[in-house]
Amino acid sequence: MSRKIYKDIAELIEKRRTQGLIKNERVITSPQGTEIEVGSRKNVLNFCANNYLGLANHPEVRQAAKDTIDSRGFGLSSVRFICGTQDIHRELEAKVSEFLGTDDTILYAACYDANAGIFEPFLDSKSAIIADQLNHASIISGVRLCKAKRYIYSHNQVGTGNYTFDGKTLPGLEAILSSEEVQACEYRMVSTDGVFSMNGDIAPLGEIVDLCEKYDAILMVDDSHATGYIGATGRGTHEHFGVMGRVDLITTTFGKALGGASGGCTSGRQELIDWLRQMSRPYLFSNTVAPTVVGATLKVLDMLTENTILRDRVHANANYFRNKIKDAGFSIIDGDTAIVPIMFGEYENDAVLAQKFANDLLEHGVYAIGFFFPVVAIGQSRIRVQLSAAHTPEQLDRAIEAFVAVGRENGIID
Ligand SMILES: *Cc1c(COP(=O)(O)O)cnc(C)c1O
């Protein structure tokens, strides 16, 4: 059948292809890790997984998943409130709450769902959401599902003025919170990522918490890129800034540092979590988290509570890599996380160059990905490097050598 939309979409894709903006997926034929098989290539060094603590294929985590299959089965074939809650789901909710220092926790199939289901139960058209300009796509999806008034503040700016970031001029958080319009709303919810995935920078949570208390706003932090390794014992951004217990709602994923399978949660104030359990649509109408994921995540939290070896190692690796790459002359966004963005915005056709750089890196046995519009702003293309506790010093040095070689080949550094 020939419909107009088929032809139009094929043309759109072709146009994107000629602009160098098509995302192609590479196929991995090994478990996730620091050395993987990509197609026919063996021993490719992986620098683009969210496997911050190296737990995605950790023997103890794998064993916990296998043991849980034996003790609790493969699937539950149900949502939570019908027959999808096992003892281990409750146990995981309690353990996450203890780890994050919150009252209670509710599990979701993914953090995407946690974010999709967090706004609408609390906020209607009489209320306001005040969100950081760079918030994750899943938060934006959640905001779209509710009728609250929407305000965007300039990325990580808490002040009362206007600020320009990524070519957009927007007010700071206090400018919005203190406005009559927003103060006249029934409820106000401020929403931010803890660590921003594309920039690897951290939200100034200390100041944000103070402002939320001053202007009577609920604070929601998505700590997906922080939980497990940011803060002295890896509890997250709230620990990093010494504001544990002062964030109303934290959403996070089990699909990154905490083993990397899937699953997510919302954790926070008892009254708010109680209400989500009654009202949050992705929780009510989507399947329970698989027992294997629950069992393995319980194991991960035990491991992270015992000591901070992995947390300390990923920070040491990130600092080592960041310093070496800076010294080599690359232009990066500086920071304190395990994300190191190498920026190509100063070059013409930055999107194409970022893609080429990634392809050339693969020729040198290193896997990293070029990001470009619409994932990041136009003219802000980058290679995002993600470090893991599992990277060895030898792997880090091999990767740095490859970056330097490809940088020289492409005339980016001398
Ligand atoms: C990865 C990520 C998500 C999505 O998590 P999933 O559990 O994979 O759905 C949500 N928010 C942020 C900030 C993320 O980085």
Image (cartoon, rainbow, N blue to C red):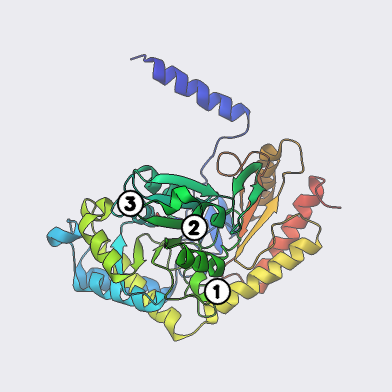
Number of dots carrying numbers: 3
Q: Which residue is at 25% across, 56% downward?
A: 283
Going from N to C along the chain, the mark reached first, 3 or 1, is 3
Give the residue number, with chain letter if any, for mark 3: 123
Q: Amino acid at mark 2?
A: Thr
Q: Quadrant of ligand 1?
A: bottom left
Q: Amino acid at mark 3?
A: Leu
Q: Quadrant of residue 366?
A: bottom right
Label 1 sits on a secondary structure element that is loop
With respect to residue 229, does 197 lie above or below? Answer: above
Q: Which residue is at 61% across, 53% downward?
A: 368
The residues bearing labels 3 and 2 have C-alpha atoms spaced at a distance of: 16 Å
Q: Quadrant of residue 279?
A: bottom left
Q: Amino acid at mark 1?
A: Phe
From the image, state whether disc 3 or disc 1 is nearer to you: 3
From the image, state whether disc 3 or disc 2 is nearer to you: 3
The residues bearing labels 1 and 2 have C-alpha atoms spaced at a distance of: 14 Å
Label 3 sits on a secondary structure element that is loop
Give the residue number, with chain letter if any, for mark 2: 192
With respect to residue 345, does 330 lie above or below? Answer: below
The residues bearing labels 3 and 1 have C-alpha atoms spaced at a distance of: 27 Å
Give the residue number, with chain letter if any, for mark 1: 241
